[in-house]
Amino acid sequence: MAEDRVEFERKDGIGIAWIDNQAKRNALSSRVLADLSAILDTVERDGKIKVLVIAPRGKHFSAGFDIGGIDDLPALRERLALFARTLPQIERLSVPVIAAARGYVYGGGFELALACDMIVASERAVFWFPEANLGGCPPFACLRLYQIVGRPRAKEIIMTCKQLSASEALALGIVNRVVKEEELIDSALSLAQDIAQKGSAVIQMIKIGINRELGSSDIAYWRGCDLAPKSYEDWQKGIKAFFGAKQ
């Protein structure tokens, strides 16, 4: 059995994508991203699933983009390309997607949550973009966060690597609701069920209407940027320096 995967479950018209890479705090590995992309394709074709919930196994939603198992720059670029395909796929999905966020919601994990239509957060969730400390950039966050919190706040959050508590994320409009840790999954499923009771065509129309400007020129711009570091060795040095400073 793979150590990193996303399991798919159906529950009364609700689909649940369980991220399970607990050894790495649910980091977004190539396998996790590929599994999630395949699940999104399944939901799109299914016709009976009215809402999808992305939820974590274990204590953390996702510690971010998996930097492990990357041996050279082409491998890094390949994983970045997979990441760049999967997030817009969530935005284009015809059914609403709800993120059930707990624990670490870091980097690429935070971006994954932002790609979803709604976020239900545990009171213990922490949202963080550490990329600037690593000499990197969270590209999807640069496209989406300012649309929620405004340009000045988005720049501050991303440039200073400011950590946000669940209550701070709620106040900024990043998350829809904050619930007790033990109530997270039930609360996300309750919200999903409330939406699923409405007409599918109407819900799809609402999502398309609100997301109408997403996933076109902005995503093309992202994909056109070479965001991988120019030197794999320099990238590795930056990673080691950051984690060394954190110890």
Image (spheres, rainbow, N blue to C red):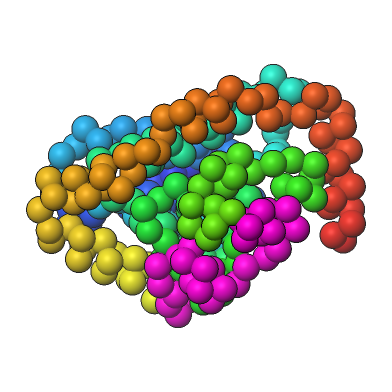
Q: Where is residue 10 in the image (x, y as percent from the top left)?
A: 24, 51
Does the magenta segment cover residue 64? no
Q: Is 29 above or below relative to 117?
A: above
Tag count: 0
Q: In which quarter of the image is residue 225?
A: top right
* Residue 106 picture location, percent across and down: 62, 55
Pick the front one: 173 or 103: 173
Please tell me which residue lies in front, 153 or 101: 153
Residue that appears at 44% across and 75% down = 178
Q: Can residue 162 be seen in this view?
A: yes
Q: In this view, does 199 lie above or below 136?
A: below
For the C terminus, the image quarter is: bottom right
Tell whether 174 sits left or right of 241.
left
Please identify the residue farthest to the bottom as the structure is shown. Answer: 180
> In the displayed structure, would residue 92 be above or below residue 112?
above
In the image, residue 161 above or below residue 2: below
Whether residue 27 is visible here, answered yes or no, is no
Left or right position of 157 against 18: right
Q: Viewed as shown, does residue 179 lie left or right of 110?
A: left
Question: Where is residue 195 drawn, in percent x and y?
Answer: 20, 60
Q: Residue at x 74, y 40 (%)?
A: 136
Depth order, front residue of 50/148: 148
Region rendered in magenta: 152-181
